[in-house]
Amino acid sequence: MDDKTHWWDDEREIRAQYWHPGPGQVVVDIGCHIGSYTIPALEAGATVYAVDPCEARLSQLDSFWGGDPERLTCVKKAVAEPGGYPDWFLSVSAYQEFHAPADADFTTLDELTSDYSLTRLDWVKVDVEGAELGVLTGGMETLARFRPTVLIEAHDMIYGWVARLGSEGKCRDLLTGLGYEVQIATYTRSAPRNFLIGHPVSPDSDGK
């Protein structure tokens, strides 16, 4: 990544330990922002669907990638639960346009995998500033079908309203209910926050 490394120095340790897409694998990066997870996945040989409601971010990301254009699909949408952000979320979240522009098109993870006719999905990353539970709620069929490894940036330690919702615990419970083992990694080098890493548990393993 040569001269671009300064763009994604943050969370470098998290990626080094927990983000390992490989050749031929399929990745959905929800809230791809500047590409700090998308570009390493592409460089490792994966195919990536980079999802963000901001056109400027996607344009910048597309310009960063000089490899096979067939392996990067930019999706200008916000991912949430069916119907977009519900009224209760808007009322408690001190909604700002860093979640999604007011005129954003919404989709769900389930709709996205259907729209792009995915036949495999190996990794899902979620960074949506407190709306992560809605992403999981709108992707339960996808998670149950494909059993991808899931990496979620939780925001309970960053935003008080997310902590009051108990978002991190609800995300963990949802993944556990779908047969995932959830590991928690605390990141402290910049704004402290937890990452949830969901590993699918094999039906014949002791951790079922």
Image (cartoon, helix red, strand yellow):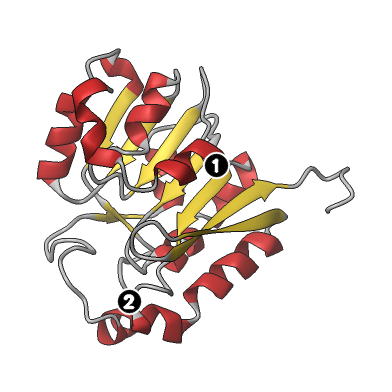
User: What secondary structure is marked by label 1?
Assistant: helix
Q: Is residue 200 above or below residue 97?
A: above
Name which quarter of the figure residue 100 lies in: bottom left
Residue shown at 45% from the left, 20% from the top: 44
Q: Quadrant of residue 91?
A: bottom left
Q: Residues within 10 Å of mark 2 (few under 14, many from 20)?
A: few
Label number found at residue 53: none
The amino acid at mark 2 is: Pro
Residue farthest to the front, as pictured:
189
Nearer to the camera, 179 or 34? 34
Q: Are marks 2 and 1 in contact (CB under 8 Å)?
A: no
Residue that label 2 marks = 86
Which label belongs to residue 18?
A: 1
**Which quadrant of the figure has residue 96?**
bottom left
**Place of residue 183 in the rendered image (x, y in percent of width and height, measured from the top left):** 64, 56
Q: Nearer the viewer, residue 179 or 41?
A: 41
| Nearer-the-camera pick, 95 or 182 | 182
Q: Residue at x 49, y 37 (%)?
A: 16
Q: Earlier in the sequence, mark 2 or mark 1?
A: 1
Q: Secondary structure at mark 2?
A: loop
Name the residue type under label 1: Tyr
Q: Is residue 72 visible?
A: yes
Q: CA distance from mark 2 to mark 1?
A: 31 Å
- The residue at the point 50 percent across, 80 percent down is 166
Which quadrant is home to the N terminus? top left
The image shows residue 48, relative to residue 114, as above or below, that is: above
